[in-house]
Image (tube, rainbow, N blue to C red):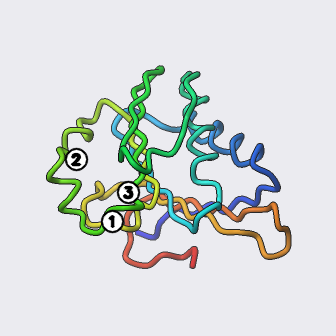
């Protein structure tokens, strides 16, 4: 079955935040999102929007050095940043699987680095700079697992 793919174009960090907030309305406990893209493409801005949409009013930062931040809202949100992970086994060694109980939403920045340990139904979101607008982003959302990635 081919994946469902949506492509969005945002023109500012605020629009990326707003897209995350809109996306949060579709999320349910047990969902995992893999955020993929270069540094500065809006992964954390999108996560902030998702958190806001889930009723989380905490200050959201990328957990680059702590690996995961957990936030309480309508649904628990675990926000991972695996940028510094060289081997997915490192995550398994610290209890990665304990965060995937089906009761929470997991957002994994740099999820493409640990694709093999993500749940098979992970929503993949690729963020790229829009070559026609220095502040713009192209955001490709792919639902359902597939070997081919149509957003590249």
Q: Residue furthest right?
A: 133
Mark seen at residue 96? 2
Q: Nearer the viewer, residue 41 or 31?
A: 41
Mark 1 touches mark 3? (CB < 8 Å): no
How far apart in space, not on screen, are marks 1 and 3 (Cα)?
11 Å
Q: Secondary structure at mark 3?
A: loop
From the viewer's perspective, tell me whether residue 118 is left or right of residue 37. Answer: left
Mark 3 touches mark 2? (CB < 8 Å): no
Residue found at x 65% / y 61%: 41
Query: What is the crowding at mark 1: few (fewer than 14 residues within 10 Å), some, or many (at least 20)?
Result: some
The percent position of residue 44, horizontal first and vertical second, equals 58, 48
Residue 70, image quadrant: top left
From the viewer's perspective, tell me whether residue 90 is left or right of residue 34. Answer: left
Residue holding disc 3: 82
Q: Quadrant of the N terminus?
A: bottom left
Reply above or below: 152 against 73.
Answer: below
Mark 2 vs mark 1: which is more N-terminal?
2
Mark 1 vs mark 3: which is more N-terminal?
3
Mark 3 vs mark 2: which is more N-terminal?
3
Mark seen at residue 115? 1
Residue found at x 44% / y 50%: 64
Q: Nearer the viewer, mark 1 or mark 3?
A: 3
Reply above or below: 128 against 32.
Answer: below
Residue found at x 30% / y 30%: 103
């Amino acid at each position: 079955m081919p994946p469902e793919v949506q492509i969005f174009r945002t023109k500012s960090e605020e629009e990326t935040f707003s897209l995350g907030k809109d996306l949060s309305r579709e999320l349910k406990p047990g969902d995992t999102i893999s955020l993929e893209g270069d540094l500065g493409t809006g992964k954390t801005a999108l996560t902030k929007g998702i958190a806001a949409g889930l009723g989380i009013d905490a200050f959201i930062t990328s957990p680059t050095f702590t690996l995961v931040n957990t936030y309480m809202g309508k649904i628990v949100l675990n926000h991972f940043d695996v940028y510094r992970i060289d081997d997915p086994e490192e995550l398994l060694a610290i209890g990665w699987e304990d965060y995937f109980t089906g009761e929470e939403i997991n957002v994994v920045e740099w999820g493409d680095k640990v694709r093999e340990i993500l749940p098979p139904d992970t929503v993949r979101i690729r963020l790229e700079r829009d070559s026609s607008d220095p502040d713009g982003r192209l955001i490709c959302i792919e639902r359902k697992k597939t070997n081919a990635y149509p957003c590249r």
